[in-house]
Image (spheres, rainbow, N blue to C red):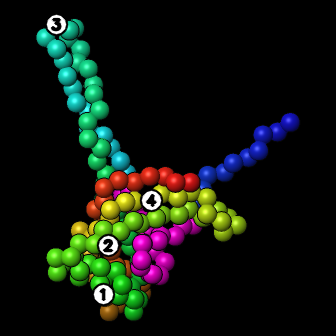
Amino acid sequence: MTAERTDPYRNFRFRVEIEGLQQAGFSEVSGFDASFDVIQYREGNEAITTRKLPGLARYGNISLKWGATDSIELWEWIQDCVNGTVERKTVTIIAIDEEGGDVATWQVIESWPVRYTAPNFNGQGSEVAIELLELAHEGMTRTQ
Protein backbone atom coordinates (compact mmCIF):
# COMPACT_ATOMS: atom_id res chain seq x y z
CA MET A 1 0.00 0.00 0.00
CA THR A 2 1.48 3.35 -1.00
CA ALA A 3 0.84 6.64 0.72
CA GLU A 4 -0.76 9.46 -1.24
CA ARG A 5 1.84 11.87 -2.52
CA THR A 6 1.50 15.50 -1.44
CA ASP A 7 3.70 17.92 -3.32
CA PRO A 8 4.41 21.43 -1.99
CA TYR A 9 2.69 24.38 -3.62
CA ARG A 10 4.50 26.38 -6.28
CA ASN A 11 5.43 29.94 -5.31
CA PHE A 12 4.57 31.38 -8.73
CA ARG A 13 0.87 30.40 -8.64
CA PHE A 14 -0.95 32.88 -6.44
CA ARG A 15 -3.32 35.79 -6.38
CA VAL A 16 -3.87 38.71 -4.03
CA GLU A 17 -7.22 40.15 -3.05
CA ILE A 18 -7.42 43.54 -1.35
CA GLU A 19 -10.75 44.23 0.26
CA GLY A 20 -12.77 46.44 -2.03
CA LEU A 21 -9.99 46.99 -4.59
CA GLN A 22 -9.71 45.43 -8.02
CA GLN A 23 -6.10 45.25 -9.20
CA ALA A 24 -4.38 43.36 -11.95
CA GLY A 25 -2.14 40.44 -11.01
CA PHE A 26 0.85 40.91 -8.75
CA SER A 27 4.26 39.63 -9.76
CA GLU A 28 5.60 39.28 -6.22
CA VAL A 29 4.39 39.23 -2.62
CA SER A 30 6.99 39.15 0.14
CA GLY A 31 7.58 39.91 3.78
CA PHE A 32 4.60 38.37 5.46
CA ASP A 33 6.10 36.93 8.61
CA ALA A 34 5.54 36.86 12.35
CA SER A 35 7.97 36.91 15.26
CA PHE A 36 7.57 37.07 19.00
CA ASP A 37 9.52 38.97 21.62
CA VAL A 38 11.09 36.86 24.32
CA ILE A 39 11.06 38.29 27.83
CA GLN A 40 13.77 36.91 30.06
CA TYR A 41 12.84 36.83 33.74
CA ARG A 42 14.56 35.61 36.86
CA GLU A 43 13.59 35.78 40.51
CA GLY A 44 16.35 36.27 43.05
CA ASN A 45 15.98 32.85 44.69
CA GLU A 46 16.09 30.84 41.44
CA ALA A 47 18.98 29.15 39.68
CA ILE A 48 21.20 31.17 37.34
CA THR A 49 19.04 30.29 34.34
CA THR A 50 16.35 32.74 33.32
CA ARG A 51 12.79 31.88 32.43
CA LYS A 52 11.66 32.81 28.96
CA LEU A 53 8.20 34.30 28.69
CA PRO A 54 6.27 35.19 25.54
CA GLY A 55 6.15 38.90 24.75
CA LEU A 56 4.55 40.92 21.98
CA ALA A 57 3.89 39.49 18.54
CA ARG A 58 5.41 41.48 15.68
CA TYR A 59 4.55 41.33 12.01
CA GLY A 60 6.78 42.35 9.11
CA ASN A 61 5.53 44.72 6.45
CA ILE A 62 4.24 43.11 3.27
CA SER A 63 5.59 44.19 -0.12
CA LEU A 64 3.46 43.91 -3.25
CA LYS A 65 4.98 44.32 -6.72
CA TRP A 66 3.05 44.62 -9.96
CA GLY A 67 3.49 45.78 -13.51
CA ALA A 68 2.33 49.38 -13.96
CA THR A 69 -0.93 49.72 -15.89
CA ASP A 70 -3.65 52.34 -16.24
CA SER A 71 -5.28 51.12 -12.99
CA ILE A 72 -4.95 53.71 -10.22
CA GLU A 73 -7.03 52.16 -7.44
CA LEU A 74 -4.00 51.33 -5.30
CA TRP A 75 -2.61 54.80 -5.95
CA GLU A 76 -5.90 56.31 -4.74
CA TRP A 77 -5.62 54.24 -1.52
CA ILE A 78 -2.12 55.66 -1.02
CA GLN A 79 -3.33 59.21 -1.71
CA ASP A 80 -6.12 58.82 0.84
CA CYS A 81 -3.43 58.00 3.43
CA VAL A 82 -1.36 61.01 2.36
CA ASN A 83 -4.47 63.16 2.83
CA GLY A 84 -5.00 61.86 6.37
CA THR A 85 -7.65 59.21 5.74
CA VAL A 86 -6.01 55.89 6.57
CA GLU A 87 -8.39 53.15 5.47
CA ARG A 88 -7.33 49.78 6.80
CA LYS A 89 -8.10 46.78 4.62
CA THR A 90 -7.85 43.00 4.76
CA VAL A 91 -5.38 41.58 2.24
CA THR A 92 -5.75 37.94 1.26
CA ILE A 93 -2.90 35.98 -0.33
CA ILE A 94 -4.07 32.78 -2.00
CA ALA A 95 -1.89 29.91 -3.23
CA ILE A 96 -3.25 28.15 -6.32
CA ASP A 97 -2.63 24.49 -7.20
CA GLU A 98 -1.77 23.05 -10.62
CA GLU A 99 -5.47 22.66 -11.49
CA GLY A 100 -6.23 26.31 -10.65
CA GLY A 101 -7.94 25.71 -7.30
CA ASP A 102 -7.34 27.65 -4.08
CA VAL A 103 -5.25 25.53 -1.72
CA ALA A 104 -3.82 27.82 0.97
CA THR A 105 -4.94 31.24 2.16
CA TRP A 106 -3.32 33.84 4.39
CA GLN A 107 -5.28 36.85 5.58
CA VAL A 108 -3.44 39.97 6.64
CA ILE A 109 -5.65 42.19 8.79
CA GLU A 110 -5.80 45.95 9.31
CA SER A 111 -3.39 46.66 6.42
CA TRP A 112 -2.56 50.16 5.21
CA PRO A 113 0.07 51.66 2.88
CA VAL A 114 3.32 52.85 4.42
CA ARG A 115 5.53 53.09 1.34
CA TYR A 116 5.14 53.38 -2.40
CA THR A 117 7.81 53.19 -5.08
CA ALA A 118 7.09 54.27 -8.64
CA PRO A 119 8.64 52.38 -11.58
CA ASN A 120 12.15 53.07 -12.82
CA PHE A 121 12.34 54.04 -16.48
CA ASN A 122 15.27 53.49 -18.83
CA GLY A 123 15.25 54.41 -22.50
CA GLN A 124 17.51 51.44 -23.28
CA GLY A 125 15.70 48.92 -21.09
CA SER A 126 13.23 46.22 -22.01
CA GLU A 127 11.84 45.24 -18.60
CA VAL A 128 8.30 45.76 -17.35
CA ALA A 129 7.73 48.94 -15.31
CA ILE A 130 7.18 47.72 -11.72
CA GLU A 131 5.33 49.52 -8.92
CA LEU A 132 5.88 48.58 -5.27
CA LEU A 133 3.54 49.02 -2.33
CA GLU A 134 4.55 48.25 1.24
CA LEU A 135 1.80 47.58 3.77
CA ALA A 136 1.92 47.67 7.56
CA HIS A 137 -0.59 45.42 9.31
CA GLU A 138 -1.68 44.16 12.69
CA GLY A 139 -1.70 40.42 12.23
CA MET A 140 -2.16 37.50 9.92
CA THR A 141 -3.94 34.19 9.96
CA ARG A 142 -3.84 31.13 7.77
CA THR A 143 -7.42 30.36 6.92
CA GLN A 144 -6.97 27.33 4.66
Q: Earlier in the sequence, mark 2 or mark 1?
A: 1
Residue depth check, mark 2 versus mark 4: number of the one nearer the observer: 4
Closer to the camera in the image, 124 or 133? 133
Q: CA distance from mark 2 to mark 1?
A: 17 Å
Query: What residue do we see at 29% from left, 79% from top?
Result: 77
The residue under label 2 is: 133
Left or right, 80 with respect to 62, comes to: left
| The residue positioned farthest toward the right in the image shown | 1
Q: Earlier in the sequence, mark 3 or mark 2?
A: 3
Which quarter of the rendering shows the C terminus?
bottom right
Q: Earlier in the sequence, mark 1 or mark 3?
A: 3
Magenta part of the protein: which range? 13-32
Q: Earlier in the sequence, mark 2 or mark 4?
A: 4
- Label placed on residue 107: 4
Residues under numbered marks 3 and 2 in contact, where contact means CB atoms less than 8 Å apart: no
Q: Earlier in the sequence, mark 1 or mark 4?
A: 4
Q: CA distance from mark 3 to mark 4?
A: 45 Å
